[in-house]
Image (spheres, rainbow, N blue to C red):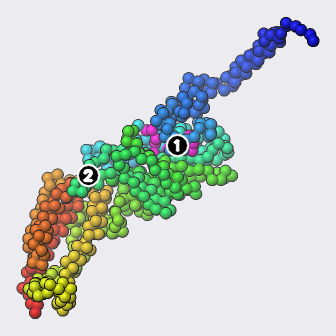
C-alpha cells in the first residue's frame, strides 16, 4: 500500500478556473437580463407582488404597492388571498381617475379595479347639510373594484370612455385579458357591470368585487326611546333572506349562493344584484377599530374551458321602494318593513298615491290616517254597541255574581247564557285594537324607514318628517287628545284598577313618541282626534238606543 502525505487542495488550479468561469457566466447573464427587462430589474427598491421575498414573513402586497400590516395580513383569508405565487402577478401602475358627474351622482372611476371613489348622492344631504357620501374615506377597498381571487392587489385597468355613461376597461395579467364594462343609469342610481376574463392562465382561479362603507357610531336606544338609525348587511339567497344589524362587536360572517348583497343605512344603500352564471360566496366583515364594513363577493372559476364572465347590477343611492322594485323585487327588501312587510308595501303605495294628489307628505300622512280609521270604523261601531249592551247588563251580571258566588262554574254558565240572549260579546272591544295592531306596526316601519319622508317638510315648524318634532308639540297634543278620549269613554265594565292604568297610557305614549319621526307622531295625533270625534258621535246617539230588558 502506497503511503503519501499529498492531498487534493480545494484551491487547486482547475477548481479556481471553474469558479471564475461560473462567475463570468452569471455576471454576463444578469447583464443580459437587465438590459432585456429593465422595468423588472429596476424595481428592487419598491416591493411589489412580483418580489414576495422582499416582504416580511406573512405580509402581502397592499393596494398602494407597500407592505400590508400584520393585522391586515391576518385578515387576508377573508379577501380570498393566498400566497402571491398562486395567481398571476400584478404590476402596480400609477392610479388614474376619470370623473363622472350627473344630476344625481358624482364620483371618480379609478384605474385600480375600476372601483368608484368619492361617491356622492347629489340630491340628498345629511341633517347637518352635507352631501350624502358612500364608501370608506381611507379607501382600503373601493366599491365595485375588481381583483383576482387570491390577490390583495386590485387589477390595473386602462379605461376608455365610449360615451358619457359608458366606460370600458382592460387589464392584462399573465395570459389573461380582463375586460370590464361599466354602464351608468344615473336617474335610477344604477350601474350595469359586465366582466369577462378571456385567454388562459393556469393560476387564474376567479375574480372578486366588494361593497364597503364607513362604520358610524351606534346611536343609543331603548324601549321608551327607540331609534331607526342603524347600519346593516342584507343578503338574499335562493333559500333565505338575512338582515344583520351592526352591533358594538366586530363581526365576520359568510353566505353561499348569494343573489343580492347590500350594505346600507336607514335611508341609503349600496347593493349588488347578481345575474351571473357563477353564484358568488359573500363574506361580511365589520371592524370597529378601522371604522370599516365590507361585503366581499368571491366568484370562483367553474369551467376552465370557457371564458369567465360576470354580470351584475350595482345600486348606490336612496332606498326608494318603487325604484328598487323596478330593478328587482327582492332588492326592495333592503327597505325594512318588518314582519308585516306585505301590509307595509300597500301602505307605502297608498301614501305615494296621496302625495301625488296633494303634493305634501304631511297631508298625505293625514289622508292615510283617515282612510285607515274609516276601514276599521265598522269594527269600532260593532265594538261600541257590544260595550253599551255590556253596560246595560251590568246589574244582571252583578246579581249573578252574588247569587252564584260559591259556584264559579254555574256563575260562568249563567253569565254566558245571558250574553248570548242579548248578543253581547265581552271581547268585542279588543277586535279593533287587534286589527289595527299589525297596521300600526307596519306604519311604524314605513314612516320610520321610508326615504320619501326624509327631509320632507310638512309646514309650520315641521321641516323634516323623518326627524322628531323639535318642539314636541305633536307628541304633547297627541297625549292630551288621547287622555281626553279616555275620559269620555265609558269604563263601567272595567275594573277600577284597570281603568286607572288605562288613563296612564296617554302619558306613556307621549314619552314614547317624543323621539320618533314627526311623520309617525302626526299619524298618531290625527288618529287620536278621529277617535275623539268618533266617541262623541257614539255618545250623542246613546239616548236613541233601545233599552235592554
Q: Quadrant of the C terminus?
A: bottom left
Q: Is residue 414 above or below residue 277?
A: below
Q: As rendered, which of 353 and 400 lies closer to the eye?
A: 400
Report the magenta residues as a range.
139-151
Q: As rendered, which of 380 and 164 lies closer to the eye?
A: 380
Specify the farthest residue to the left.
543
Q: Which mark is residue 221?
A: 2
Q: What is the x, y in percent for residue 514?
A: 18, 56
Q: Which mark is residue 77?
A: 1
Local packing at callout 2 (Cα closer than 10 Å; few below 14, some 14-19, many 20+) is few
Q: For the point 67% across and 23% down, which residue is it?
A: 34
Local packing at callout 1 (Cα closer than 10 Å; few below 14, some 14-19, many 20+) is few
Dot 2 lies on which element? loop
Is residue 128 found left or right of 106 in the rendered image? Answer: left
Q: Is residue 306 above or below residue 437?
A: above
Q: As rendered, which of 477 and 490 lies closer to the eye?
A: 490
- Assess whether residue 141 is covered by the magenta stretch: yes
Res. 49 image quadrant? top right
Q: Quadrant of the N terminus?
A: top right
- Assess whether residue 12 is covered by the magenta stretch: no
Q: As rendered, which of 416 and 156 lies closer to the eye?
A: 416
Q: CA distance from mark 1 to mark 2?
A: 35 Å
Amino acid at each position: 500500500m502506497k503511503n503519501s502525505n499529498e492531498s487534493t487542495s480545494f484551491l487547486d488550479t482547475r477548481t479556481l478556473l471553474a469558479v471564475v468561469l461560473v462567475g463570468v457566466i452569471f455576471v454576463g447573464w444578469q447583464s443580459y437580463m437587465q438590459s432585456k427587462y429593465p422595468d423588472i430589474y429596476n424595481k428592487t427598491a419598491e416591493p411589489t407582488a412580483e418580489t414576495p421575498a422582499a416582504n416580511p414573513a406573512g405580509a402581502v402586497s397592499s393596494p398602494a404597492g407597500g407592505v400590508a400590516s400584520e393585522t391586515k395580513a391576518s385578515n387576508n383569508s377573508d379577501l380570498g388571498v393566498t400566497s402571491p405565487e398562486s395567481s398571476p402577478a400584478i404590476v402596480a401602475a400609477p392610479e388614474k381617475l376619470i370623473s363622472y358627474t350627473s344630476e344625481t351622482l358624482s364620483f371618480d372611476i379609478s384605474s385600480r379595479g375600476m372601483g368608484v371613489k368619492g361617491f356622492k348622492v347629489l340630491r340628498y344631504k345629511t341633517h347637518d347639510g352635507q352631501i350624502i357620501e358612500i364608501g370608506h374615506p381611507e379607501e382600503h377597498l373601493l366599491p365595485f373594484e375588481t381583483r383576482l381571487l387570491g390577490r390583495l392587489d386590485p387589477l390595473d385597468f386602462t379605461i376608455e370612455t365610449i360615451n358619457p355613461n359608458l366606460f370600458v376597461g382592460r387589464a392584462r395579467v399573465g395570459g389573461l385579458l380582463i375586460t370590464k364594462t361599466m354602464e351608468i343609469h344615473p336617474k335610477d342610481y344604477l350601474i350595469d357591470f359586465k366582466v369577462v376574463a378571456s385567454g388562459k392562465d393556469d393560476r387564474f382561479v376567479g375574480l372578486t368585487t366588494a361593497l364597503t362603507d364607513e362604520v358610524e357610531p351606534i346611536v343609543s336606544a331603548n324601549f321608551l326611546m327607540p331609534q331607526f338609525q342603524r347600519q346593516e348587511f342584507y343578503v338574499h339567497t335562493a333559500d333565505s333572506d338575512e338582515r344583520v344589524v351592526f352591533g358594538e362587536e366586530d363581526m365576520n360572517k359568510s353566505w353561499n349562493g348569494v343573489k343580492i348583497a347590500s350594505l346600507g343605512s336607514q335611508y341609503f344603500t349600496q347593493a349588488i344584484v347578481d345575474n351571473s352564471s357563477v353564484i358568488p360566496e359573500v363574506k361580511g366583515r365589520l371592524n370597529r377599530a378601522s371604522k370599516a364594513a365590507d361585503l366581499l363577493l368571491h366568484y370562483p372559476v367553474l369551467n376552465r374551458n370557457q371564458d369567465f364572465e360576470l354580470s351584475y347590477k350595482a345600486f348606490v343611492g336612496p332606498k326608494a321602494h318603487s325604484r328598487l322594485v323596478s330593478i328587482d323585487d327582492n332588492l326592495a327588501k333592503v327597505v325594512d318593513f318588518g314582519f308585516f312587510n306585505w301590509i307595509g308595501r300597500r301602505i307605502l303605495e297608498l301614501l305615494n298615491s296621496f302625495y301625488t294628489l296633494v303634493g305634501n307628505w304631511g297631508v298625505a300622512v293625514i289622508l292615510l290616517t283617515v282612510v285607515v280609521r274609516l276601514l276599521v270604523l265598522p269594527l269600532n261601531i260593532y265594538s261600541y254597541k257590544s260595550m253599551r249592551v255590556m253596560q246595560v247588563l251590568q246589574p244582571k251580571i252583578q246579581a249573578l255574581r252574588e247569587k252564584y258566588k260559591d259556584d264559579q262554574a254555574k256563575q260562568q254558565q249563567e253569565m254566558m247564557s245571558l250574553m248570548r240572549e242579548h248578543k253581547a260579546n265581552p271581547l268585542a272591544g279588543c277586535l279593533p285594537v287587534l286589527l289595527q295592531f299589525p297596521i300600526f306596526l307596519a306604519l311604524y316601519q314605513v314612516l320610520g324607514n321610508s326615504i320619501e319622508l326624509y327631509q320632507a317638510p310638512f309646514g309650520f315648524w315641521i321641516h323634516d318628517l323623518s326627524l322628531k318634532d323639535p318642539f314636541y308639540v305633536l307628541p304633547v297634543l297627541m297625549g292630551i287628545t288621547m287622555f281626553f278620549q279616555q275620559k269620555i269613554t265609558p269604563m263601567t265594565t272595567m275594573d277600577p284598577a284597570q281603568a286607572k292604568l288605562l288613563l296612564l297610557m296617554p302619558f306613556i305614549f307621549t314619552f314614547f313618541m317624543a323621539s320618533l319621526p314627526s311623520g309617525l307622531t302626526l299619524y298618531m295625533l290625527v288618529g287620536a282626534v278621529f277617535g275623539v270625534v268618533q266617541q262623541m258621535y257614539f255618545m250623542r246617539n246613546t239616548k236613541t238606543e233601545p233599552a235592554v230588558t
